[in-house]
């Protein structure tokens, strides 16, 4: 086993280098626990845990701990000073995570410097989502332990470059790199490891699992879709998000209007525009999780290789054979 894969497994406590990425919707406690139980590594999405599935954050973590004795992580999305209420909430979630014994944080957006500082005081590993080399190098300088490399084949908020380009540019960075995007079968998984990635992150494949609590219509759409059915829209978070092309998604077009476009181009306004879009998007995705008639389905380009809904244990066993 490659040195950095061994480091990743040590950082997470997983037995196989497969992460279930945090998803909204999709990250219900049963799914997170099932992935960790099966030797992979589940990551909690706090908004999904609390808002979507209605758990008190601490009680939600405790539920996962009852469902699995294996480690799992928590995701923190950083919005800086744009929303002080959210920032305080994130600090509270981080404190609770530490108290509940979580030893792995996956950070997204923003600068994780303060989180890294706190994490190091408690022997917690921090990996950060990165879209390109420039951000990756900055995050290494910030002290993160590994990088989640989001490529252009991912579902939800997606990257802009290929997995191959990522590994070519960052092969000598010296910390574990996780391939995030387009991994949906054993061949994809093995190829990523052979390229030099320490592990893979999957979302879409785990959405189409029995333990995931999204609607059956969502799971069926994943099974029936091909790579060509995946389109990009910036209406969810201000940057490109990969979704399945449906009438609900196409209504009103895939791109934001002139006012939001202007805000997204201005550094001082961009965070406010993104938070507005994301808060509006949450309303749609709250319905997506429970209402079969709502067709806001995030998914990556790996959909073409997903042919059936399976149990998490079978998915991970199939990959690791």
Image (tube, grey):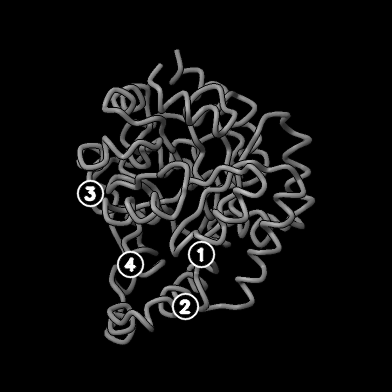
Marks 3 and 4: in contact by CB < 8 Å? no
Residue 109 shown left or right of residue 120 in the figure: left
Secondary structure found at label 4: loop
Mark 2: few, some, or many residues within 10 Å (few <14, many ≥20)?
A: some
Q: Quadrant of residue 283?
A: bottom right
Q: Answer left or right for 306 relative to 16.
A: left
Question: In front: mark 4 or mark 1?
Answer: 1
Residue 125 at x, y percent in the picture: 56, 42
Residue that mark 1 sits on: 78
State the residue position of label 3.
Answer: 161
C-alpha distance separating marks 4 and 3: 17 Å
Q: Residue at x 26, y 51 (%)?
A: 133
Residues at marks 2 and 3 touching, judged by CB atoms closer than 8 Å? no
Classify mark 1: residues with Cα within 10 Å, few (<14), some (14-19) or many (20+).
some
- The span from disc 4 to disc 1 (Cα, nearest Å) is 19 Å
Disc 4 designates what residue? Answer: 234
User: Where is residue 111 drawn, in percent x and y?
Assistant: 45, 63
Task: Tell me the CA gap for discs 2 and 3.
Answer: 26 Å
Residue beneath the point at 61% across and 50% down: 119
Which part of the image, by quadrant, shows the C terminus? top left
From the image, tell me which residue sits under label 2: 276
């Amino acid at each position: 086993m490659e040195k950095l894969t061994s480091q990743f497994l040590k950082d997470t406590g997983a037995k196989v280098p497969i992460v279930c990425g945090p998803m909204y919707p999709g990250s219900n406690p049963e799914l997170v626990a099932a992935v960790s139980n099966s030797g992979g590594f589940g990551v909690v999405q706090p908004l999904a845990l609390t808002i979507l599935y209605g758990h008190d954050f601490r009680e939600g973590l405790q539920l996962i701990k009852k469902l699995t004795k294996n480690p799992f992580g928590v995701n923190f999305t950083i919005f800086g000073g744009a929303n002080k209420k959210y920032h305080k909430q994130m600090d509270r979630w981080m404190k609770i995570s530490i108290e509940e014994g979580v030893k792995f944080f996956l950070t997204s957006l923003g600068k994780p410097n303060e989180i890294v500082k706190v994490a190091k005081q408690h022997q917690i590993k921090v990996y950060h989502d990165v879209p390109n080399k420039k951000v990756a190098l900055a995050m290494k300088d910030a002290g993160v332990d590994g990088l989640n490399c989001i490529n252009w084949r991912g579902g939800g908020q997606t990257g802009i470059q290929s997995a191959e380009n990522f590994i070519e540019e960052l092969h000598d960075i010296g910390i574990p790199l996780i391939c995030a995007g387009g991994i949906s079968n054993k061949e994809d998984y093995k190829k990523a490891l052979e390229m030099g990635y320490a592990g893979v992150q999957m979302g879409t494949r785990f959405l189409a699992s029995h333990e995931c609590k999204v609607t059956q219509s969502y799971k069926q759409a994943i099974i029936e879709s091909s790579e060509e059915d995946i389109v990009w829209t910036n209406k969810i978070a201000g940057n490109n998000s990969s979704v399945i092309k449906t009438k609900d998604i196409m209504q009103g077009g895939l791109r934001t209007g002139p006012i939001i476009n202007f805000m997204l181009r201005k550094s001082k306004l961009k965070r406010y525009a993104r938070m507005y879009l994301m808060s509006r998007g949450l309303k749609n995705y709250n319905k997506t999780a429970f209402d079969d008639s709502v067709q806001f389905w995030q998914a990556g380009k790996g959909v073409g290789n997903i042919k059936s809904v399976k149990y998490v244990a079978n998915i991970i066993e199939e990959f690791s054979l």
